[in-house]
Amino acid sequence: MRLKNKIVAALLGFVALPVAAFAAVIGGTYYAPQYDFREFFAATDGRNFQVILAGNAFPGVDPNTVARDLLPAMQAAKPRPALTFTYDAPVERPRPDYRLVLVFDSALDLGSDSVCRGVTRFKPGQPGLFYVYAVYCRNDQAMSETTAWTPATGPADPRIQQLFRELFQVVFSDSPALRPQNGGNDRR
């Protein structure tokens, strides 16, 4: 009986291996002490939410094509509020100004607060690798940030939608541990 269980476990491991090989990898995260998912939810539920793309996710592919193909992938993987991702800037800059900045192949020394102030720097990309630095901004301050990467052949690759699904769970985390309590921070 034990041999049979080992064989079944080994076969399941081989089946799961190709799936794991294509999974997105989420890098380190940062949340500002002021980060509050409830604020994000209230600001975006039923509204447009601006996404700013910086860099070239797929060198050799027209950036307009990349943007066009990434938007439905992001929308299908959107976080819980009934928001609509858009690249369009609001006619009047809202206060507070919430947005998501996606920097493709960002320089290693690029910080999130700089990104929220409009600064971007890049490193050379790796062919076949979709690498993004995601920063959720409120005005010129970063509320959260993380990196993510996955192998991808182009902007319509289904692995990108899966990456966004995992990425948005981190950037827009609703974890109670991240909730500011009574003007303070309850994180330990």
Image (spheres, helix red, strand yellow):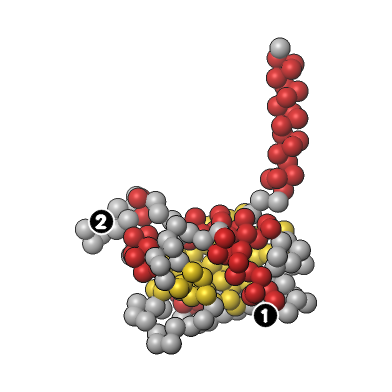
Give residue 43's quadrant in the image.
bottom left
> Which residue of the protein is positioned furthest toward the bottom in this rendering?
91
Residue 17 spot, x, y in % from top left: 73, 41
Count residues near mark 1 (Cα–Cα under 10 Å), then give few for <14, some for 14-19, many for 20+: few
Callout 1 secondary element? helix
Q: Which residue is mark 1?
A: 64
Label 2–label 1 contact, CB within 8 A: no
Residue 141 spot, x, y in % from top left: 40, 74
Residue 140 spot, x, y in % from top left: 41, 78
Nearest the viewer among 77 and 188 is: 77
Q: Residue at 59% across / 73% down in the picture?
A: 103
- Residue 159 visible: yes
What is the three-letter code of the residue carrying label 2? Gln
Q: Is residue 185 above or below residue 88?
A: above
Residue 178 spot, x, y in % from top left: 36, 55
Labels 2, 1: front one: 1
Q: Which residue is mark 2?
A: 181
- Residue 35 visible: no
Q: CA distance from mark 2 to mark 1?
A: 43 Å
Q: Residue at 71% across / 32% down in the picture?
A: 12
What is the three-letter code of the residue carrying label 1? Asn
> Which residue of the protein is positioned furthest toward the left in this rendering?
182
Q: Residue at 29% across / 58% down in the picture?
A: 180
